[in-house]
Amino acid sequence: FLVFLRYQIYYSYPLQSYLEYPIIIAQDVILLLFILHFRGEMKRALFYAVTFWGGWYLLTLQKWIIDLAMNLCTFISAASKLAQLRYLWQTKDSGQVSALTWSMAAYTC
């Protein structure tokens, strides 16, 4: 979502075309903070914040970086789904995986 948001801001797309991305990013940040809080690892939040801001800046250092990042998004999303499938196959335990939400995520990739 960071790449999509930064790409659309970089190329001056109309705000209506990417307004959902800041909301989705905020949801992900809140979810990550909850996970870190309940695991007792809040000190890692600083690392993730620095990584986020570094990535935000790094994406627009050169035009080719943002273009390459945008082109790799589909590949990375698909690769993450394959990694999840591999993990499920190895453990033979779906655990907390919902078929509906997983298929929706796979569809949006």
Image (cartoon, rainbow, N blue to C red):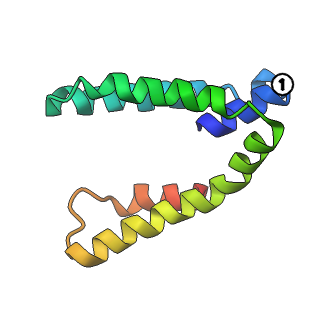
Identify the residue at image location x=59%, y=38%.
Answer: 1
Q: Percent x, y for residue 90?
A: 25, 77
Dividing the picture into quadrants, the one containing residue 30 is: top left
Pointer 1: what residue? 14
Q: Nearer the viewer, residue 79 or 48?
A: 48
Q: In the figure, 75 relative to 93: above or below?
A: above
Identify the residue at image location x=38%, y=65%.
Answer: 84
* Number of dots carrying numbers: 1
Q: Percent x, y for residue 8?
A: 77, 32
Q: Secondary structure at mark 1?
A: loop
Identify the residue at image location x=24%, y=23%.
Answer: 43
38 lies left or right of 8? left
Q: In the figure, 33 relative to 97: above or below?
A: above
Q: Nearer the viewer, residue 39 or 104?
A: 39
In the picture, which quadrant includes the C terminus?
bottom right
Q: In the figure, 10 relative to 68: above or below?
A: above
